[in-house]
Amino acid sequence: MIGDELAAAMHLTACQRDNRIHHRVFRTLTDQFQTASALIETPQQDLRAILLGILQDFGEEHNQHQFLANQKAIEPFLAGIKNQVRYQEKREQAMRVESFEIFPLLSGSPRYPYRLKNVDSAPSVLYARGRQLDRLLAQPLWVTVVGTRIPTLYGQLVTEAITRDLAIQGVVIVSGLARGIDTLAHEVALEHAGLTVAVISCGLDLVYPPENKHLLERIVEQGVVFSEHPPGVQALRQYFPARNRLLSGLADAIAVMEAAEKSGTLITADFASEQNRDVLAVPGNILDRASVGCHQLIRDGAKLLETAQDIFDLFPKQNLLQLAIPTSVQDGQIAFDRMRLTTEQQRFLQALRGQTLSINQLVQYLKLPISQVIHIISFLEMNRLVAENRGRYALTAIGHCSI
């Protein structure tokens, strides 16, 4: 039963935490079992023998102090595992969150994401919610889409375009459910019937940020949500950087859409480099500080990301379809091929190539009366050629096709 397995996993991780068993020792132990129940039910003398063997290898790689500390912790750890009172407490806790259908994945489980298995710091127990795990695991390409929590309109547009083109080709979209780019990436994937994975920094019976509760429930239906934390753990500030190593470790490539100079997104990119993952970054306006982080990544060796095809080109053996322009964009192109835009409307679209502008900037650039600029904006917005965000205008995908 899911509840019993969840209780076993929670009990096991609590014993590891309470007795300060080194992560590497614990992970090597869990690698040898497919379920937490199987580990807990193993005779104590057999577990002791396994742990002593692990410690022998561990001692060759670490200092004597760490070795002795873990050797001393073995007996209390084994006693804790067999403590039925403590186990019953976890069982009652698991029953209280039964409706969330949380299931744990031990690192030795065949359903544990194989990309994470090669990440040394990956959790020994990964908690999951979702109805599409097996389907997700069968997909050949996972891409993590990340970026600032306060994106510009440009950042939103490139995220929508690239994520859409990835999702319609069957790429699994991974992100962190955070405000801004993360939320948008999940929403675009869901909108195009794609598969998506969220990695959160709290227990799976909780939601952070709280306004994404409905989005999380949609992901549960159409993807999976992961956390390294058992139920009941709140989203504390110190958990977010650690979460980023999972965002990078779960994916084949990391796509950075927009990032300021000091951004948590750059932490994910750093982890990706350490994990030998491809990092791609979208270039932006050199006058906009929201793009400073992406430009720094490109200077440091990240690959230039302009379209989804840049990602597909990195994985030719994945047998993915060549990227085609979505039907919606084709239809928009046909419609505007037949429509004669005025010279002023064409100049307006040209002015927005590669940048966002306010009404005042457009008036200065086009040298037109503000009343005429507002009239042009109304027409182009109504026909989905431009979009506005916080007083600045940018081209949509159809707008780009219409130039």
Image: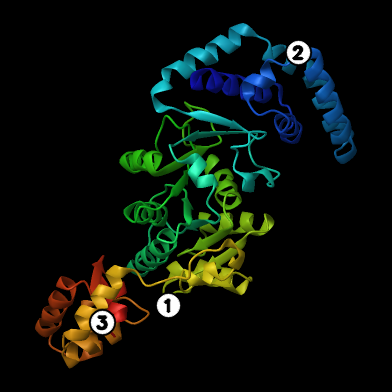
Residue visible at 34% across and 56% down in the picture:
192
Q: Within 10 angstroms of label 2, few (less than 14), some, or many (20 or more) residues? A: few
Coordinates of residue 374 in the picture (x, y in percent): 13, 78
Q: Residue at the spot x=65%, y=9% of the render?
A: 83
* Left or right placement of residue 302 versus residue 79 in this view: left
Q: Mark 2 points at which residue?
A: 43
Secondary structure at badge 2 equals: loop
Say which amino acid is labelled 2.
Pro
Disc 3 packing (10 Å; few <14; some 14–19; many ≥20): few
* Element type at mark 3: helix
User: What kind of residue is marked 1?
Assistant: Leu
At 55% across and 49% down in the image, what residue appears? Answer: 247
Residue 396 visible: no
Quick one: label 2 or label 1, which is nearer the N terminus? 2
Image side of residue 319 versus residue 388, left or right: right
Depth-wise, is mark 2 or mark 1 nearer the camera?
2
User: Does 304 sit above or below residue 189?
Assistant: below
User: Between 382 and 356, which is closer to the camera in this rendering?
Assistant: 382
Q: Distance between the residues labelled 2 and 1?
A: 64 Å
Name the disc covering residue 107, or none. Answer: none
Local SS, label 1: loop
Query: Which residue is farthest top?
Result: 85
Q: Where is residue 403 in the image (x, y as percent from the top left)?
A: 29, 85
Reading the image, the residue beneath label 3 is 361
Q: What whole-number distance in Å separates the C-alpha atoms at marks 1 and 3? A: 14 Å
Q: Determine the residue positioned at 62% across, 7% down.
A: 84
Q: Is residue 277 visible?
A: yes
- Where is residue 202? Give x, y as percent: 48, 35
Residue 287 image label: 1
**Residue 386 to residue 180: above or below:** below
Which sits earlier in the primary sequence, circle 1 or circle 3?
1
Q: Which of 350 and 18 is in front in this view?
A: 350
